Amino acid sequence: MDNIRYREAFLVLDEGNTGVITVDDVHFLIRALGYTPTEQDLAKLDQEFAWNKRIDYFWFTEILSKLSCTKYTYEQIENAFFTFDKNRYGLINIEAFKTAMMTLGEPLLEKEMNEMMKDLPVDEDGFIEYESFCSQFQSSEKYL
């Protein structure tokens, strides 16, 4: 099943059906397929393919198989949110969440954060109900 998804994603960015995509396209696809590469992973990829900025499908699948990326479980996502919900109300302030996502650990780029923000279940008071977000986050192949 993943191979079909990988092939379809690759073909979307293979403009002109040349059979190759750019290293930058690979960076994008890695994240779009739900992996969370570190900057070190991406820098290693850039270095490995510095001689040839074009990657075919075979190398693309090899890259995916070697990444030290993580997919998260519902419990891992929920536990991370407890950091923001100290009173255990089940709500997280959207501004605090956005700031943390863009500054802590392996920070998201503004473009990535804006994409994620479109999918967040934010209430009229500016809070995320994290149980529904965790369920949505885990079921979305976009993030996992």
Image (cartoon, helix red, strand yellow):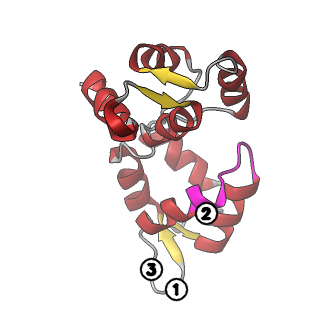
Q: Residue at x 49, y 61 (%)?
A: 115
Residue 66 disc label:
none
Mark 2 residue crowding within 10 angstroms, few (<14) / some (14–19) / many (20+): some
Q: Residue at x 62, y 20 (%)?
A: 52
Q: Residue at x 28, y 34 (%)?
A: 8
- SS at badge 1: loop
Task: Identify the mark at residue 125; answer none if there is no mark.
Answer: 1
> Where residue 41 sits in the image (x, y, percent)?
67, 25
Q: Earlier in the sequence, mark 2 or mark 1?
A: 2
Q: Which marked residue is nearer to the observer: mark 2 or mark 3?
A: 3
Query: Which mark lies nearer to you, 2 or 1?
Result: 1
Q: CA distance from mark 2 to mark 3?
A: 15 Å
Please, what is the dominant secondary structure of the magenta stretch? loop
For the residue labelled by badge 3, is the local secondary structure a helix, a strand or a loop? loop
* Residue at the disc numbered 3: 123
**Cβ atoms under marks 2 and 3 closer than 8 Å:** no
Q: Are marks 2 and 1 in contact (CB under 8 Å)?
A: no
- Image quarter where the C terminus lies is top left
* Image x and y of residue 77, in percent: 51, 45
Q: Count residues near mark 3 (Cα–Cα under 10 Å), then give few for <14, some for 14-19, many for 20+.
A: few
Q: Label 2 is placed on what type of residue?
A: Asp
Instruction: Give, as a single range, the part of the protein colored magenta.
Output: 104-113
Q: In the image shown, does 92 or 102 lie closer to the viewer?
A: 102
The answer to the question of whether label 1 and label 3 lie on touching residues, with beta carbons closer than 8 A, is: yes
Q: Relative to 72, is 18 on the left or the right?
A: left
**How far apart are labels 2 and 1 at the CA level?**
15 Å
Q: Residue at x 75, y 50 (%)?
A: 104
Q: CA distance from mark 1 to mark 3?
A: 5 Å
Q: Circle 2 is placed at which residue position? A: 85
Residue 97 occupies quadrant: bottom right
Task: Give the class, few, some or many, for how many residues have Cα within 10 Å of label 1's Cα (few <14, many ≥20).
Answer: few
Residue type at mark 1 is: Asp
